[in-house]
Image: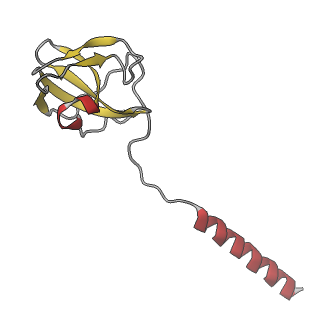
């Protein structure tokens, strides 16, 4: 009887070890989320840049091309980065256009230095 209990305990222990070995360990960080249309963000970054010469980008009400255009980041406008978030299409920065005093989301591939490096938290 004792040998049978010992064998069951050994099998159970092996099963627990096998399951725990297969679990992945992850660290906390920016989740894949986006800013829905109409969602702004808090000021976290403060990096100031000048829009690249010859480039113009739509500033949107959310981090998607499906959101309404809220303004434009045009050729040589002064921009102030607030923070970034993720979306299915990449990262987007929430920013303030110093030239025309508008705020909105711009896809980071269109921005100088690849946009903000401060995560919005969503």
The image position of residue 41, as x and y in percent, is: 30, 25
User: Which quadrant holds the N terminus?
Assistant: bottom right
Count of number-bearing discs:
0
The image position of residue 42, as x and y in percent, is: 27, 27
Vertical order, 79 against 116 (above or below): above
- Image check: 10 left or right of 116? right
Vertical order, 109 against 10 (above or below): above
Name which residue lies at 25% across and 39% down.
Answer: 118
Name which residue lies at 53% across and 59% down.
Answer: 24
Give residue 50's quadrant in the image: top left
Name which residue lies at 30% across and 33% down.
Answer: 84
Name which residue lies at 31% across and 12% down.
Answer: 69
Work out whether residue 63 or residue 74 is closer to the camera in this orientation and state it.
Answer: 74
Which residue sits furthest bottom? 3
Give residue 106's quadrant in the image: top left
Which residue sits furthest right? 1
Work out whether residue 105 or residue 29 is closer to the camera in this orientation and state it.
Answer: 105
User: Which quadrant holds the C terminus?
Assistant: top left
């Amino acid at each position: 009887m004792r040998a049978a209990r010992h064998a069951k305990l050994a099998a159970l222990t092996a099963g627990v070890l096998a399951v725990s070995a297969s679990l992945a360990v992850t660290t906390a960080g920016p989740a894949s989320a986006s800013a829905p249309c109409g969602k702004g963000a808090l000021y976290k970054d403060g990096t100031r840049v000048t829009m690249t010469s010859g480039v113009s980008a739509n500033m949107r009400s959310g981090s998607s091309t499906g959101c309404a255009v809220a303004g434009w980041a045009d050729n040589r406008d002064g921009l102030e980065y607030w923070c970034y978030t993720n979306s299915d299409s990449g990262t987007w920065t929430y920013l303030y256009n110093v030239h025309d005093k508008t705020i909105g989301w711009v896809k980071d591939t269109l921005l100088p230095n690849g946009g903000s490096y401060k995560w919005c938290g969503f």
